[in-house]
Image (cartoon, helix red, strand yellow):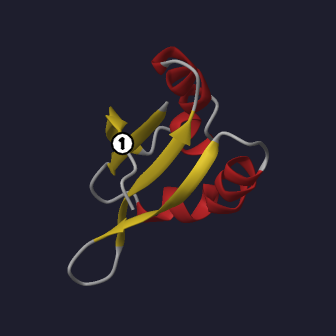
Amino acid sequence: MLIALIARDKAGHIELRKANRAEHIEYLKSGTVVSQAGPLLSEEGDMIGSLIILDVVTLEDAHTWSAHDPYVKAGLFESVEFIHWNKVI
């Protein structure tokens, strides 16, 4: 099952994002769960969130994976949404 994890950063937390980015990227690459990932950007090109496509067995697996993300542990996100996603192209 593919899950789109859409996370929005708390306003004014770019330094927290930068401080945890290397560890976050290492976590993204550490297993086989992440299919695609990248930052959401403002119109000015600033990082304001994350879009991560997870390939998991259950929605609970997506929540468990997310709980261990360094960004989540650091308290970066204002909101996190999990949406079942169907790849067409």
Question: In the visual, does 87 lie left or right of 33?
Answer: left
Measured as percent of width and height from the top left, residue 8 is found at 31, 49
State the image quarter where residue 71 is shown.
Answer: top right
State the image quarter where residue 12 is shown.
Answer: bottom left
Name the one closer to the observer, 34 or 24: 34
Q: Is 1 situated above or below 74?
A: above
Measured as percent of width and height from the top left, residue 54 is found at 53, 40
Measured as percent of width and height from the top left, residue 68 is found at 64, 30
**Residue located beneath label 1 in the image:** 86
Q: How many numbered circles are shown?
A: 1
Q: Quadrant of the C terminus?
A: bottom left
The residue that appears at 48% across and 47% down in the rendered structure is 53
What amino acid is labelled 1 in the image? Asn
Question: In the visual, does 31 lie left or right of 59?
Answer: right
State the image quarter where residue 78 is shown.
Answer: top left
The residue that appears at 20% across and 80% down in the rendered structure is 43
The furthest residue to the left: 43
Secondary structure at badge 1 equals: loop
